[in-house]
Amino acid sequence: MRQDDCIFCKIIAGEIPSQAIYEDEEFKVILDVAPATKGHALILPKNHYANLYELPEEKATDVMKLAKKMMKVMTDKLHCDGFNLVQNNGEAAGQTVFHFHMHLVPRYKNDGEILKYIAQNPSQKELEEIKKAITE
Ligand code: 5GP
Ligand code: ZN
């Protein structure tokens, strides 16, 4: 299952070079070419799914298991002090490559990276309305 115009499908097929740090039957993990921090990597399923909406449930479970495994290895080897997992779905959410990927971002004390969101200040009423919209 590949999409011919997809850059990550080409990387998985070896048609575009990458620095792979892990590979198995289901996944390839590569270093990001424009890293947020030292060691920033991407978990790519070998099959093409555009995003988490399309990723089958059992693959989603496997992605999280692999993220945990990679986090441990990378923390041991890179001596990072923390870790962010980031996963964008859709242009509105900042996705730029439309082949599912999970960012593994090692964090170092005072690394200066800003992976933050701007906190809103909703009223209790607004929070209740949102809760209703989601749960009812
Ligand atoms: P997104 O914004 O879709 O969540 O993340 C896409 C990521 O893919 C970005 O961090 C970007 O640097 C990375 N990326 C884009 N093109 C390439 C490439 O050709 N090789 C590698 N290794 N990473 C890439
Ligand atoms: Zn693809």
Image (tube, rainbow, N blue to C red):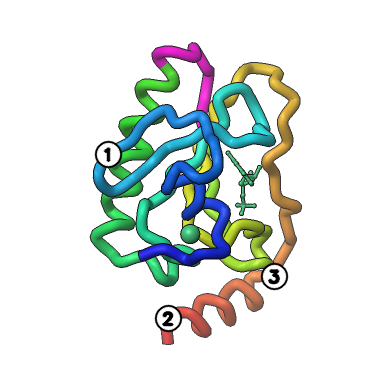
Alpha carbon of mark 2 to alpha carbon of mark 1: how far? 38 Å
Q: Where are the magenta residues, as a range?
A: 76-83
Q: Is residue 53 left or right of residue 118?
A: left
Q: Is residue 58 left or right of residue 77?
A: left
Which amino acid type corresponds to the residue marked 3 in the rendered image? Ser
Which amino acid type corresponds to the residue marked 1 in the rendered image? Asp
What secondary structure is marked by label 1?
Answer: loop
Alpha carbon of mark 2 to alpha carbon of mark 3: how far? 18 Å
Mark 1 Cα within 10 Å, few/some/many (few <14, many 20+)?
A: few
Q: Which residue is mark 2?
A: 135
Q: Are marks 2 and 3 in contact (CB under 8 Å)?
A: no
Q: Which residue is mark 3?
A: 123
> Tag 3 or tag 2, which sits nearer the N-term?
3
> Tag 1 or tag 3, which sits nearer the N-term?
1
Residue at (33% x, 36% y) in the render: 23
Q: Which residue is mark 1?
A: 24
Residue at (42% x, 48% y) in the render: 13
What secondary structure is marked by label 3?
Answer: loop
Which amino acid type corresponds to the residue marked 2 in the rendered image? Thr
Residue at (38% x, 52% y) in the render: 45
Does 38 sit above or below residue 62? above
Counting every numbered tag in the picture gives: 3
Select label 3 or label 1 by which is in front. 1
Location of residue 82 in the rendering, given as x and y in whole percent from the top left corner: 52, 25
